[in-house]
Amino acid sequence: MSNGAAWLSGIVTSWAILTTGHAAPYRPSSDEVVLERLRPALLALRQLRGSAMPAPGPPNLDAALASAQHYVELGQTYADPRAYGYAQAALGEWWTRDDGATPALLVMRARILQFNHRFAPALGQLKVSLASDQFQPDAWLLLASIEQVQGNIPAAQAGCIKLLPMADPLISATCVATTGALSGRADAAEQLLARALTQPSAGGKAVTVWAWTTLAEIRARRGDATGAQAAFHSALALEPDDVYARAALADLLLDEGKNADARAALGDASQADALLLRAAIAAQRNGDADADDLRRNLEERFAEARERGDETHLREQARFALDVNHDASHALGLAVRNFAVQREPADARILLEAALASNKPDAASPALEWMRTTGIEAVSLSALSKKLDGGPQG
């Protein structure tokens, strides 16, 4: 199994918006405010913009796919949407060309569509690809991820089962554990994944980071903060710059009221909106001097997204509205729209929180129904549901 498939570890929850727009420019309060530091890998992304593009002339599919893969790998780690834009550009006419479209091309298109939350066309590409070749672990893993983020847990589980005879055991175990934990079998899922992480794997570093992060999230939902932190640290020891793992660890620390620790875990939060959002929450709760600068910076980024018609980060915008701007009504509107598109634990949580803060318990009905249907075990969701009239009591 190639490392290329491992980028799916955090694909359903990639949040960053780092592009420019036409809103009034954000101006920091002083020259000391850091807007962005370019890490070596992001500098490499800019260099690849020229060097990884296929040479002029007749389009070569293999070269186009290789170029696109370079960008996708960077986009995975840094949650940078520019990388996926470059990946699409690298495909050139192969982005829309159907004659000669190979299964690998169809899967690559689906990866890019999925990142942009265009789930239906992404699934369409995958189904065509799998109809021609059912032995594609990358395709089954991506299909399972998309079905999961839309709340179709049985379909996601079916995709994971398809992986069993063809993928690295750690990939299969992580996929199965992820869907199992979302369907009332958290204990078995945790045991399966913990055991799999003790076995040899040929999946590569990215796969192991995904597995440790998934284990951490399962433990966090079960209320095992100590075990969750240990697993997060194992993931970040392998890949310190993994945006998804850093953001998820910060969420755990924020839930424990450890705001300063959360900021420390985020590192340079300017690199991605997912990190900046959590830094803004921590700074406001802690009364940090840069809290207002962080808030305005995020407002600028979200305004740019709205001007572009980008609705792929409604969950983060809802959380910003609720936890930073304390605008429960606006947060609820965003959370309702978001849950209509994607249904994962974090999507349910922001909808429950916003409905509770707005004193509109009926608005939480879709999330409560999703909890009943899936049987998910999550301490935070159960606590919120008990505060809402008609919420499940288990």
Image (cartoon, rainbow, N blue to C red):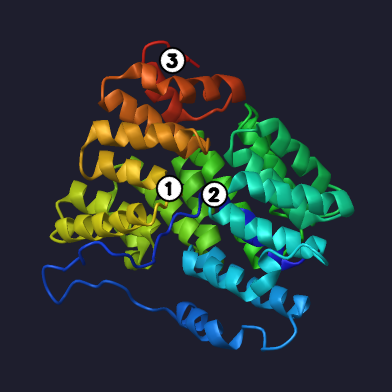
Q: Residue at x 77, y 61 (%)?
A: 200
Q: Quadrant of the N terminus?
A: bottom right
CA distance separating discs 3 and 1 = 28 Å
| Mark 2 Cα-neighbour bin, 10 Å: few <14, some 14–19, many ≥20 | many
Note whether residue 134 is visible.
no
Left or right: 20, with 244 as reference point: left
Tell me the amino acid under the disc marked 1. Answer: Glu
* Crowd tier of the residue under label 3, counting other residues whose Cα lies within 10 Å: few below 14, some 14–19, many 20 or above: many
Q: Nearer the viewer, mark 3 or mark 1?
A: 1
The residue under label 3 is which amino acid type? Gly
Residue highlighted by disc 2 = 117
Give the SS element for disc 3.
loop
Q: Which mark is residue 311?
A: 1
Q: Nearer the viewer, residue 46 or 58?
A: 58
Instruction: Name the residue at 38% across, 35% down.
Output: 335
Q: Earlier in the sequence, mark 2 or mark 3?
A: 2
Judging by the rendered image, the residue that carries numbered circle 3 is 391
Instruction: Give how far across and how far down residue 47 sits, in percent.
Output: 51, 86
Give the mark nearest the N terminus, 1 or 2: 2
Q: Are marks 1 and 2 in contact (CB under 8 Å)?
A: yes
Residue 391 versus residue 96: which sits nearer the camera? 96
Residue 354 position in % (x across, y down): 32, 30
Q: In the image, what residue type sits under mark 2?
A: His
